[in-house]
């Protein structure tokens, strides 16, 4: 605790003492009601303190933040509350949200994400096979004209569209290998090009 923190704590203590004193003098005849009000204000105060203390966790849960590209051509991805890493890539100028999956060999799009980037799943040839935790599924090979992360853009990127049900598109090793370094640190996942 530094001197600024001690000064803030002293200020809040003094402010609290003034408020308590004012409540007591105004409500001398009804001490029971005063106690109820004190408990209510105390709970409100504790709720505000808890919300401030947990704000980063709340914000990350509601809207996970993706770090932006740094000057050294690296990007840091924070670990999501579920323990995974997520990354938004621009594919053909459309934002697609991926689960980073180092256990997946390929970049795999859900059918709905494929439609968003201009591919019609009905026109695709599902000739490939992939083994997943839910068993074998059919896949269709595709080429993505443009895949961008920040200022780094790759062209003619090979990917697959999954014919089965998937909650999330997967960003597998075929894309991650385009980066010169992949590190998992206490700050998160770091990709460097």
Image (tube, helix red, strand yellow):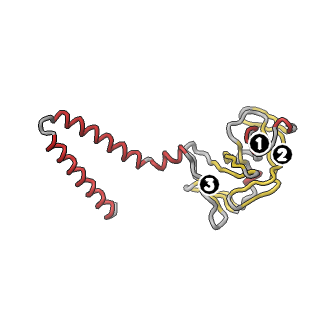
Which residue is tagged 1? 114
Circle 2 Cα neighbour tier, 10 Å, few/some/many (<14 / 14–19 / ≥20): some
Q: Is residue 163 left or right of residue 40?
A: right
Cα–Cα span, label 3 and label 2: 27 Å
The N terminus - image quarter: bottom left
Q: Are marks 3 and 2 in contact (CB under 8 Å)?
A: no
Q: Are marks 1 and 2 in contact (CB under 8 Å)?
A: yes
SS at badge 1: helix
Q: Residue furthest left?
A: 29
Residue at the spot x=66%, y=50% of the render?
88
Which residue is tagged 2? 142
Q: Are marks 1 and 3 in contact (CB under 8 Å)?
A: no
Q: Give coordinates of residue 27: x percent, y percent.
A: 15, 39
Q: Relative to the observer, which residue lies in front, 166 or 132?
A: 166
Q: Is residue 113 left or right of residue 123?
A: left
**Disc count in the image?**
3
Q: Relative to the observer, which residue lies in front, 63 or 158?
A: 63
Q: Give coordinates of residue 183: x percent, y percent.
A: 64, 57
- Earlier in the chain: of badge 3 and badge 2, it is 2
Cα–Cα span, label 1 and label 2: 9 Å
Which residue is tagged 3? 189
Residue at the spot x=66%, y=58% of the render?
191
The C terminus - image quarter: bottom right
């Amino acid at each position: 605790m530094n001197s600024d923190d001690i000064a803030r704590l002293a200020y809040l203590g003094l402010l609290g003492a003034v408020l308590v004193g004012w409540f007591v003098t105004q409500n001398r005849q009804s001490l029971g009601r005063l106690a109820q009000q004190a408990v209510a204000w105390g709970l409100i105060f504790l709720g505000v303190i808890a919300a401030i203390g947990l704000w980063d966790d709340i914000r990350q849960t509601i809207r996970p933040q993706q770090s932006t590209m740094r000057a050294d051509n690296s990007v840091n991805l924070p670990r999501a509350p579920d323990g995974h890493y997520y990354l938004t890539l621009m594919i053909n100028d459309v934002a697609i949200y991926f689960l980073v999956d180092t256990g997946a060999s390929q970049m795999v799009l859900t059918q709905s994400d494929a439609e968003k980037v201009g591919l019609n799943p009905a026109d695709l040839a599902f000739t490939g096979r992939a083994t997943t935790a839910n068993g074998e599924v059919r896949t269709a090979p595709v080429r993505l004209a443009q895949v961008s992360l920040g200022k780094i853009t790759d062209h003619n990127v090979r990917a697959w569209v999954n014919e089965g049900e998937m909650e999330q598109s997967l960003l597998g090793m075929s894309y991650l290998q385009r980066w010169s370094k992949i590190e998992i640190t206490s700050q998160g996942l770091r990709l460097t090009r």
